[in-house]
Image (cartoon, rainbow, N blue to C red):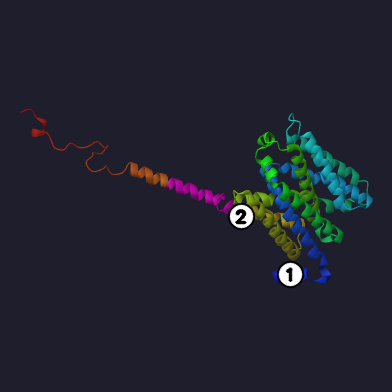
Amino acid sequence: MSPLDFLTDLFNPDLAFLSKALAVAVMSSIVCGVIGCYVVLRGMAFIGDTVAHAVFPGLAVAFVVGGNLVLGGTIAGILTAALIAVFSQNRRLKEDSIIGVFFVAAFALGIVIISQAPGYAGSLPQFLFGSITGIPDSDLYVVGITGLIVLAVVFLLNKEFVTISLDRESARALGIEVFWLDLVLYVLVTLAVVISVQTVGNILVLALLITPAATARLLTDRLGIMMVLAPTIGGVSALAGLYLSWSCDFPTGGTIVLVLTAAFLIAWFFGPRQGLIAKARRRLARRSEFAATSAGAVGEPAPGTNAVGIPEPDHQPLNNGARP
């Protein structure tokens, strides 16, 4: 299918689900790209995976009682994020240990809950791998409003988030409320994950949160540029992934993740400064410069010196040094 045919299908009233799928995928990618920058800077990728599994019991409860999946996932994710933030204040255990505990517990709880629903086996792939082509209009509005709220909070607290991401102890010394900012950031990660679960599923949502930000990190050293590049990479990859999925009849979530991974690999190899090829060129240039410098140091002796650089006498001794 050509891009023009895909564009025609997007505006086809009989294929309205396709345009809704694109809207949700792009909005989710933009929100995850922005939040993912803080996650990558703090080295807390594990929290994204934990939150993705933490929303699972909320999704399961909402499915069993016939409620809104986004709302159910949000409540469960926020509750788990709050528990992680509280327990992580105990310096006896590192943050990743606390995350690991709730990671397993939340997912196990979700499995137990959804197993009580009739016909749960058929709905399990929807939770795990996404169901982007079956999104109702109500969820479309929820994703849009939630995304705007997340971006607004990021805009207001960006300076504080950057400070605690780079140096938590200095932030505490400056009187910044690290605990409350951690809690807010966890909640924002939760919201970003919840609105993205329908796009790529519970298992693959971590890629939407981490991969665009990691790709942007390879392309720039400036946080401001990184926070523009990450959502751009995510949005473009979502569009390309949906196009490939629709054209080749591939699973949408998996295709979007593979496109994101391809973008990461391109940046890894061809990044202007941090790419593997750019680093190899710099190493070769340094070696060539060192070789040229070394060759100059051991080159021809200067005029008026011998081979080891000692000045030659102005004249030879009389009679070749013999006694008169």
* Observer-nearest of 268 and 55: 55
Q: Is residue 128 above or below residue 173?
A: below
Residue of label 2: 266
Image location (x, y in percent) of residue 307: 25, 39
First to last magenta residue range: 267-288
Q: Residues within 10 Å of mark 2 (few under 14, many from 20)?
A: some
Residue of label 1: 7
Is disc 1 placed on a helix, strand or loop?
Answer: helix
Q: Is residue 128 left or right of residue 229?
A: right
Q: Which quadrant of the rendered structure holds the N terminus?
A: bottom right
Image location (x, y in percent) of residue 141: 83, 59
Give, as a three-letter code, the residue at label 1: Leu
**Number of marks present in the image shown:** 2
Image location (x, y in percent) of residue 127: 83, 51
User: Is residue 281 magenta-colored?
Assistant: yes
Give, as a three-letter code, the residue at label 2: Ile
Looking at the rendered image, the disc whose residue lies closer to the viewer, 1 or 2, is: 1
